[in-house]
Amino acid sequence: MTKNQGPPPTQEPTAAPLPSAPAAPTAQGLRGIALVVVLTGFALSIVDAFIVNVALATIGEDLHGGPAALELVVSGYGLTYALGLVLGGRLGDAFGRRRVYAYGLAGFTLTSALCGISPTIGFLVVARLLQGAAAALLVPQVLATIQAATEGKARARAISLYGATAGLAAVAGQILGGLLISLDIAGIGWRSVFAINIPIGVAALLAVRRVPDTKAAKRTGFDPLGTVLFGVAAVCVLVVVIEGQNLGWPLWLWSLLLVAAVATVALGRVERSLEQRGGSPLLAPSVLSHPGMRMGLTAMVPFSLGFGSFMFVYALIAQTEFGLGGLASGAVLSPFAASFFVVALFTPRIAAALGRRIVSLGALFQGAGLLLMALVLGTSWPDPPLALVLAVLAFIGIGQALIGPTLFRMILADVPVAKAGMGSGVLVTSQQMATALGATLGGTLYLSLVSSLSQATAVVLVLAVLACCSVVIFLISLKLPDPR
């Protein structure tokens, strides 16, 4: 077993000095089975965000759940997941990333079993909330372990695999969910979408000791006030994002954004003061001020907004307008997932040749693909040529693959190893919240347009708006640092 505490943390002008850590890691620290184990937990967390979508109808029939309860089955997972990511990252820094990952994976496996045996819809909602919290424990440890246990080409390759896993798992969740419902294994119906996590989770747990054991050289303290303020801000934003469309956007809901803004301002002041006094803030301002993280997150937000919106609107159109079931609509996305996965594996080589221009190239591919899709659907609605649609989806997947993994590397490049968990938590939280916001905004825009325009026109306009996200990414990419 390789024990690795990471390289000496970078000294920051406003941070309290940390004691010296053991020698820098070698590229051998995280590979083979160890890398598969951490990526498995990450993949499960993403698959379960999508796999349940195709089972909602049968869950409602079996457990007598109404629309509001079924919405909570989906949104409850996302709420506790996004809310706990930063804290999960800090716990990994303090107590050891392998240990917290193992606890998170064990909790995720157990709560998956609870979801699968749920006797009532209320029981299922609570189990999904707990499942999201368990995912929030394990996911930040993945990027943090990659950051702490690898360097150079090994780190670039591992982050590329992380990005490829994200894209593949999102599509696989929809395909797998539809397949399991269709097969009705052992007659358990929708319960199989949760039961499948159990053998995978157990297998990963049995091999978890192969993962390098990394943590901060000095155990950080707890920041109760910062944690509460972050929680208030995040909950307010997530409630607006997740429930706004279902509630009809009442005035009181918008007031939560004001509460979130006040909590965010207070959080900034509290964290800055705590760091200046040599404490351990939940979100260290010195780390968040690094150019790579600051600019990378600026690009990650429109990227994730566009992804969330595209995936949601696509699913809406495929299943309501084209009459595709969950399995068929997921299968149509296979070219997107395949091109994303393959190209993501080569992004380190492409980035070595192009530098930050790889993001510019990805934005061009993505934007051109979205406009091409708008042209195809706009001129052939309601019977677009399937082969052409599949080809355009593959084209869009290439653009996404050039952008996503590169931004992951760029955002984490300047984060000290001692705070890798915090940096990972911030990155994944931003990504998840922007993706959820994109789904809400994209769905709201499409439904608003289709009420007064033709379906073809509404789709074309939504795709054009998403292409604008690619333009924003392209403009930001001109000022990004080169990925390392």
Image (spheres, rainbow, N blue to C red):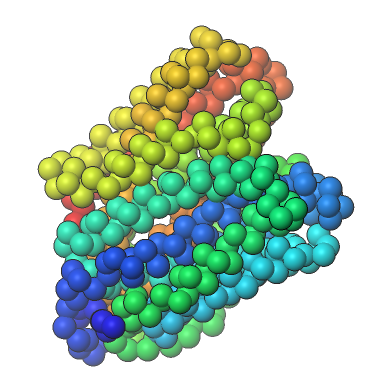
Check the image and report above or below for 76 versus 302: below
Check the image and report above or below for 459 versus 117: above
Who is closer to the viewer here, 399 or 463? Answer: 399
| Quadrant (top left/top right/bottom left/bottom right) for the C terminus | bottom left
- Left or right: where 417 falls relative to 484: right
| Count of marks overlaid on the render | 0
| Quadrant (top left/top right/bottom left/bottom right) for the N terminus | bottom left
Percent of width and height locating residue 301: 43, 48
Q: Residue at x 37, y 64 (%)?
A: 36
Regarding residue 390, the answer to whether it shows in the image is yes
Image quadrant where residue 459 sits: top right
Percent of width and height locating residue 356: 20, 45
Percent of width and height locating residue 386: 50, 19
Q: Which residue is drawn at 57% across and 47% down?
A: 176
- Left or right: where 22 falls relative to 435: left
Q: Which residue is drawn at 47% across and 75% down?
A: 205
Q: Which residue lies furthest to the left in this view?
A: 353
Image quadrant where residue 28 sits: bottom left
Check the image and report above or below for 11 versus 121: below
- Left or right: where 371 falls relative to 179: left
Percent of width and height locating residue 305: 48, 43
Who is closer to the viewer here, 103 or 483? Answer: 103
Who is closer to the viewer here, 215 or 180? Answer: 180
Regarding residue 262, the answer to whether it shows in the image is no
Image quadrant where residue 454 sits: top right
Q: Residue furthest front?
A: 186
Q: Residue furthest top?
A: 379
Q: Which residue is drawn at 64% across and 48% down?
A: 180
